[in-house]
Amino acid sequence: MLKSGIDLRTSLKLPKVGKVESYLHGVIEEKGVAHLTLLDPENVQAEVMRNLVESAESQGTDAFLVGGSTIYSREAYDEAIKTIKSSTDRPVIIFPNNVNAVSRYADAIFFMSLLNSLEWWFILGAQVHGAFLVKEYGLEAIPMGYIVFGSESSVAVVGRVYPIPIHKPNIAAAYALAAQYLGMRVVYLEAGSGVPEPLPSDLIRTVKRVVDLPVIVGGGIKSREQARDVARSGADMIVTGTLAEREVCSLGSVIEGIREGVSLRSRSQDLSGKQLR
Ligand code: 1GP
């Protein structure tokens, strides 16, 4: 109580974890890993979007991300999100490349900072420019640290990334820990869409050992075995984009690979929860 008699204690309103983020936490608790299907409206024709979404859902995907490094048309983006929303009950989350990708029709947005960009715009500029729009649309914002590896992918080039070597896991872990200490609630380790290989297991393991946040891993995951290894290494959420767009019927086998990875992970832990290897 202040001297004036005005009690300010009730005025403290802290940001809450929203519905979509809680849902993702629930999926991770229940299944060990959440599978996210990424759709880029620039790669998927409007006519096939509905079938693709229904097929991904029937094969067990847990949520949809919508985004791509070169999206420019707000109208096309809005239309794609409306189609996806009307084809599934799973959450639809914006995975933005820029301010253009803030759409009122999604359930949530990964409010992300590209931590290893050399451009202020991708670290904080676009976020400042888009923040009021997110508020106006009532979108659930999920604060995320985005870390991009390699230099060949579209996201690395468009995002002016200073590439982190994939064989220096401690550097990646330091970025991830900085994200945690800055208050971000999820970290995304990105190999880049369509790259030949997913991120290596020791990189994912090291990051998981260091941070307490859910870790998303994506880029280059196209087979059951790759999905199994990424899940086994400790990823909490796994993203597949290119495979979903080109060969949606194979998503089921990636999701099976994830389940195998989770069960191998539990077997390699002792009763105190420590990793044996
Ligand atoms: C890209 O991590 C995602 O942002 C997905 O990558 O298209 O290689 O599955 P792929």
Image (cartoon, grey):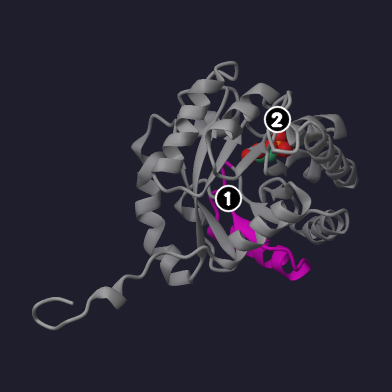
Quarter location, residue 6: bottom left
Q: Amino acid at mark 1?
A: Phe
Tell which quarter ligand 1 is in: top right
Whether 248 is drawn above or below 275: the answer is: below
Q: Amino acid at mark 2?
A: Gln
Tell me the magenta residue range: 69-94
Name the residue beneath numbered marker 2.
Answer: 275
Give x and y (percent) for residue 127: 40, 51
Left/right of residue 248 with respect to residue 15 in the rendered view: right
Pick whichever, 30 or 95, lies toward us.
30
The answer to whether residue 70 is magenta is yes
Whether 92 is drawn above or below 126: the answer is: below
Secondary structure under badge 1? loop
Asked if disc 2 and disc 1 are in contact, CB closer than 8 Å, the reply is: no
Name the residue beneath numbered marker 1.
Answer: 95
Q: Earlier in the sequence, mark 2 or mark 1?
A: 1
